[in-house]
Image: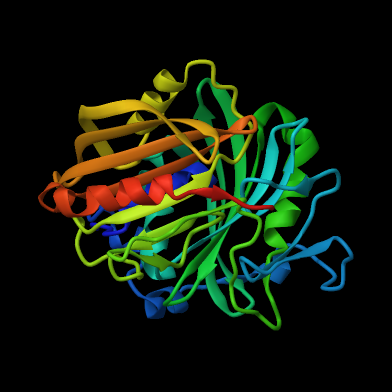
Amino acid sequence: MNCPWKHWSVVILSLSLIACGGGGDDQPESASPSSPQEIQRKERTPISSLQSLDPDDPRYVSLPESRVRVIRPDGFEDAAGFYGFQQASTGSSVMIATLPAPFAETSRGFTPAGLATQGIELQSRKEIDVVGANGVFLNVEQNAKGIDFEKWIVVFGDQDETTIVTGTFLAEKSSELSGPLRESVLSVRPELKPTKRTLGGLGFELSAADSLKPAKGIGKMLLYTKDGVVPMKSPGDPAFIAAPSITAVPIDDLESYAVDRLNQTAKTKIGEIQERGDVEVDGLEGYEIVATGEDDQGTPLVIYQMLLLNDGSYILMQGLVGDSLADRYLPDFKAMARSLRRTQK
């Protein structure tokens, strides 16, 4: 499966380490249903039967930006860089991300083969019903930079969008945190009276170019595409994202870190760096890069990146576009990045 929106899957990876369409067309049909009707025919376990929860539990927290309610684990605080909760002392989190893509399409990636492409090992998977919505409940393990993590994940959605709730904790803390984070992700409920989704607490704003329009984002981020919608019609269509890092990140060498971050762009092989240099935007020190590359289907791309240091963390901005359209959109990417202005969170 060729996901047209994979050029900004770096944001999905940054938020929940889950990318779109991981398994591709070579997955067996039994492992990746292709329609809501096919999912509906499967036996789905009601999420309420996996644990008994009081809908009036005072630990429930409403997240209007994600239009869900989730139980906050004891000892966790509101996260600054994403929608959800975090516990800095243990490096644990409960993260909510919304993808503007159908559940039937997104769920294709949540198979052993699909998750393995992201270095994630599937331990268990169960088809579930989340208050009438199709869903899956997963337990996975992942080694990131030599550190073992475990995750409880609930994924659910409909024809229009998919919500991913991920509870992440160190494997060595499993006896302490596995139970509370499992309870938290399984507690997710759509708001009974959902409000219009807003983007709160981002901490900055941009001026959009006339050639790009704001689209519904994934998490705590800004996303712009040619038509303001996703999926995009062509892998070479322009997309621009801006998002804060989800945790504090010590950066001693800004240039080296920016290049390393560029090379982590998901589903993209970076080629030659054509431009690079120091920048300053809204009083923030930063580094700007323009590079060539290609996606995993061989589509030639031009990748723009600006990384700004911001109070112990960073703001990442990336623009990706087919190389044939680079002359048209690269100036707009640069102008949008330079228009960033911090706001009160």
Residue 200 visible at all? yes
Q: Is residue 292 above or below residue 71?
A: above
Q: Image quadrant for the N terminus?
A: bottom left
Query: What x and y, as percent, mark residue 226?
Result: 28, 65
Horizontal side of 26 relative to 61 (left or right) equals left
Residue drawn where x is 79% and y is 55% of the image: 72
Name the outermost residue toward the top: 252
Query: What x and y, as percent, mark residue 177?
Result: 76, 39
Residue 21 visible at all? no
Query: What x and y, as percent, mark residue 241?
Result: 41, 51
221 and 192: which is toward the camera: 221
Q: Is residue 325 above or below residue 287?
A: below
Residue drawn where x is 28% and y is 54% of the image: 27
Q: Write down the quadrant of residue 251 in the picture.
A: top right
Horizontal side of 130 relative to 72 (left or right) equals left
33 and 308: which is toward the camera: 308
Query: What x and y, as percent, mark residue 341?
Result: 54, 49
Residue drawn where x is 19% and y is 36% of the image: 292
Residue drawn where x is 57% and y is 23% of the image: 147
How many marks overall?
0
74 and 334: which is toward the camera: 334
Q: Write down the quadrant of residue 129 in the picture.
A: bottom right
Name the outermost residue toward the left: 324
Horizontal side of 266 relative to 57 (left or right) equals left
